[in-house]
Amino acid sequence: MSDAFDAEDVARLRIALARISRMLDRQSRGDSLTRTQTSVLGTVARLGPVRISELAEIEGVNPTMLSRIVAKLEDAGLLRRRPDPADGRAALVEVTDAGAAEHRRLRTERTQLLTARLTAMPEAHAAELLAALPALECLAEQPENRSTESS
């Protein structure tokens, strides 16, 4: 870790982000989907048709495990596989109409939950959080470097 950052501050940031993520998960995904299934559905809904190998890399899940997750989402009618027209040996995963609707429902519900939380906080703190959005988005878009990650 860089000497420019206080380890305790970075730990507090990590904990706060994790708690917010868990709160949104608990209150919005219901009993039908796991956290990973919700993430896979969202990724496919955002990216459009995607190869299993690419999806596994994005989600940080091994391809065998991802194939099982996709199968459960297929069984639920949220995703479907189809042959990749560029490579007949590969499959593309795409969202179904029901999957797109579920993804929109989850996004709307999470936005409403976060809006309620922001509304309940002191206005100055909410404004500070919104002002920090560019920095948070930059942090979220940083490529993963698994060799230096720790929890």
Image: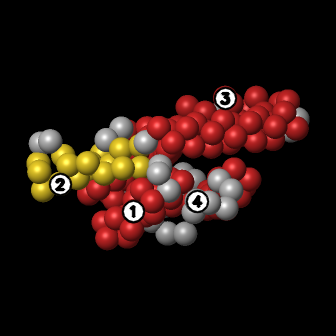
Mark 1 or 3: the one toward you: 1
Q: Residue, x 47% and y 51% (percent of image)?
A: 77
- Quickly name the residue at label 2: 90
Among the two numbered marks 2 and 1 on one chain, the one whose residue lies closer to the N terminus: 1
Report helix, strand or loop for mark 2.
Answer: strand
Among the two numbered marks 4 and 2 on one chain, the one whose residue lies closer to the N terminus: 4
Please name whichever residue, 2 or 113, is drawn nearer the observer in this view of the structure. Answer: 113
Q: Is residue 65 left or right of residue 23?
A: left
Query: What kind of residue is marked 3?
Result: Ala
- For label 4, count other residues whose C-alpha is less than 10 Å away and answer few (under 14), some (14-19) or many (20+): some
Residue 141 in view = no
Query: What kind of residue is marked 1?
Result: Ala
- Quickly name the residue at label 3: 131
Query: What kind of residue is marked 4?
Result: Leu
Among the two numbered marks 3 and 2 on one chain, the one whose residue lies closer to the N terminus: 2
Mark 3 or 2: the one toward you: 2
Q: Is residue 30 left or right of residue 93?
A: right
- For label 1, count other residues whose C-alpha is less than 10 Å away and answer few (under 14), some (14-19) or many (20+): some
